[in-house]
Image (cartoon, rainbow, N blue to C red):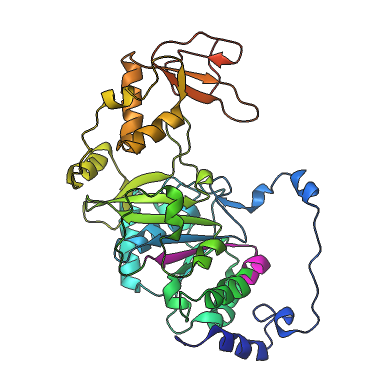
């Protein structure tokens, strides 16, 4: 029923007597307020690990993840690869599942032949065994649905499927095919996501991943964007971003087969790390180039191809000497501050980290760390070796965040 107001759909669905979508609270009958919970009590208990689905609570049961990217870049094949690997309990795109997951996808974009090609491509590229395929044969499931949208989809299609299969994750691919309303209307998206989908996630204790598109026409310069700026990369109302507990974005690079994955919301929980233990919000992955529909980790050569094909800009000829000059002649500078200053001068994040590593290996810079209460030590960079003190360990010659030997 594309184009029909969600308000009207809700009214129609309420008349049918659904227990989940169009609740008594929405109908104005027998409103029962929720019980209050002590905030202090919540702070005194650890999160239930059984509710974690992906990463370090990156996605939990009853929460939603937006998986955002332009059309035609392989988002569906990436989703298939995620579903297969997470079904096996294996990491996909560096994201570790809490356990082998049951995953149900409701999709409108690919026919059975397309999906079969994707599965064969992933299975071949990742060397799936017959035993592995059998282990997820009945736990990673797809439904092609092209006739329902909006509240009708949730009540007549999604809820019966959740009740029958009880998945850990429900994937909806894509949002624009199923919303049945104006994606820019916050009231309409809230009716679908908050009033319709959220009660189902609560009732069936599952998480949701929604594949979503960027705007069809994009004239924006993203070169200076931080990872958090990408939260709003998807088409539509900002309430989509507010609804999502986590957001993962794919963005093309100047190398045709290489793509940037950005952990835009709750990125610190996705599980990506640099060698020094710092949180990593961006990783690069590429299409399998031998003809299969699969994704692989980008190699150093793949990332170099991005730089080679990137249009040259003034100031892009910075060297490690430029970074060295940002380190004060005396004393220390926090490594994160040094990297930030380097970026402000036109040195990219990865180049700055590489320059720092080269200068340390050459003995031109020194690294140490200062203890901080209840968190990781602060990593400090200096031109000269610093003396060890009670709370500072210097000249470790490493970026490790573990305590250095005195």
| In the displayed structure image, the side of residue 347 where residue 135 appears, left or right | right
Q: Residue placed at 65% from the left, 30% from the top?
A: 374
Quarter of the image where one finds residue 63: bottom right
* 43 lies above or below 109: above
Residue 219 at x, y = what percent? Answer: 29, 63
Residue 132 at x, y = what percent? Answer: 44, 52
User: Which quadrant: the C terminus?
Assistant: top right
Q: Residue placed at 27% from the left, 37% from the top?
A: 300
Q: How many marks?
A: 0
User: Which one is in front, 288 or 218?
Assistant: 218
Q: Residue placed at 54% from the left, 55% from the top?
A: 101
| In the displayed structure image, the side of residue 75 where residue 11 appears, left or right | right
Residue 297 at x, y = what percent? Answer: 33, 44
Residue 57 at x, y = what percent? Answer: 58, 48
| In the displayed structure image, the side of residue 341 where residue 95 appears, left or right | right
Task: Please say whether residue 401 is visible from this viewpoint.
Answer: no
User: Magenta region: which residues?
Assistant: 199-214
Whether residue 13 is in magenta: the answer is no
Q: Residue placed at 35% from the left, 33% from the top?
A: 342
Whether residue 202 is in magenta: the answer is yes
Task: Please say whether residue 367 is visible from this viewpoint.
Answer: yes
User: Which one is in front, 150 or 6?
Assistant: 6
* 401 lies above or below 87: above
């Amino acid at each position: 029923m594309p184009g029909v107001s969600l308000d009207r759909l809700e009214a129609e669905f309420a008349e049918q007597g659904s227990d989940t979508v169009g609740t008594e609270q929405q109908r104005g009958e027998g409103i029962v307020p929720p019980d209050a919970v002590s905030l202090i009590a919540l702070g005194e208990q650890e999160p239930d690990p059984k509710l974690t689905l992906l990463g370090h609570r990156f996605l939990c049961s009853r929460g939603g993840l937006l998986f955002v990217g332009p059309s035609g870049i392989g988002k569906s094949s990436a989703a298939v690869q995620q579903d297969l690997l997470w079904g096996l309990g294996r990491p996909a795109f560096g994201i570790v599942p809490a356990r082998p997951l049951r995953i149900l996808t409701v999709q409108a974009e690919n026919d059975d032949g397309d999906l079969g090609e994707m599965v064969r491509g992933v299975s071949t590229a990742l060397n799936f065994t017959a035993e592995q395929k059998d282990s997820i044969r009945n736990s990673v499931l797809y439904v092609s649905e092209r006739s329902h949208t909006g509240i009708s989809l949730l009540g007549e299609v999604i809820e019966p499927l959740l009740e029958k299969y009880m998945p850990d994750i429900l994937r909806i691919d894509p949002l624009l095919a199923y919303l049945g309303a104006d994606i820019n209307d916050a009231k309409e998206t809230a009716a679908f996501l908050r009033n319709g989908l959220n009660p189902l996630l609560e009732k069936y204790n599952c998480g949701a991943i929604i594949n979503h598109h960027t705007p069809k026409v994009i004239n924006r310069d993203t070169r200076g964007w931080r990872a958090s700026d990408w939260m709003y990369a998807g088409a539509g109302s900002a309430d989509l971003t507010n609804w999502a507990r986590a957001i993962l974005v794919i963005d093309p690079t100047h190398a045709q087969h290489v793509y940037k994955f950005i952990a835009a919301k709750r990125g610190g929980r996705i599980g990506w790390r640099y060698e020094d233990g710092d949180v990593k919000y961006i990783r690069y992955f590429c299409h399998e180039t031998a003809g299969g529909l699969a994704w692989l980790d980008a190699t150093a050569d793949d990332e170099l191809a991005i730089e080679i094909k990137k249009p040259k800009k003034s100031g892009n000829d910075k060297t490690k000497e430029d970074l060295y000059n940002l380190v004060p002649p005396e004393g220390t500078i926090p490594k994160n501050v040094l990297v930030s200053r380097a970026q402000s001068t036109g040195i990219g994040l990865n180049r700055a980290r590489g320059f720092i590593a080269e200068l340390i290996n050459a003995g031109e810079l020194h690294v140490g760390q200062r203890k901080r209460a209840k968190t990781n030590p602060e990593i400090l960079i200096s031109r000269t070796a610093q003396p060890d003190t009670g709370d500072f360990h210097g000249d470790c010659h490493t970026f490790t965040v573990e305590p250095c030997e005195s």
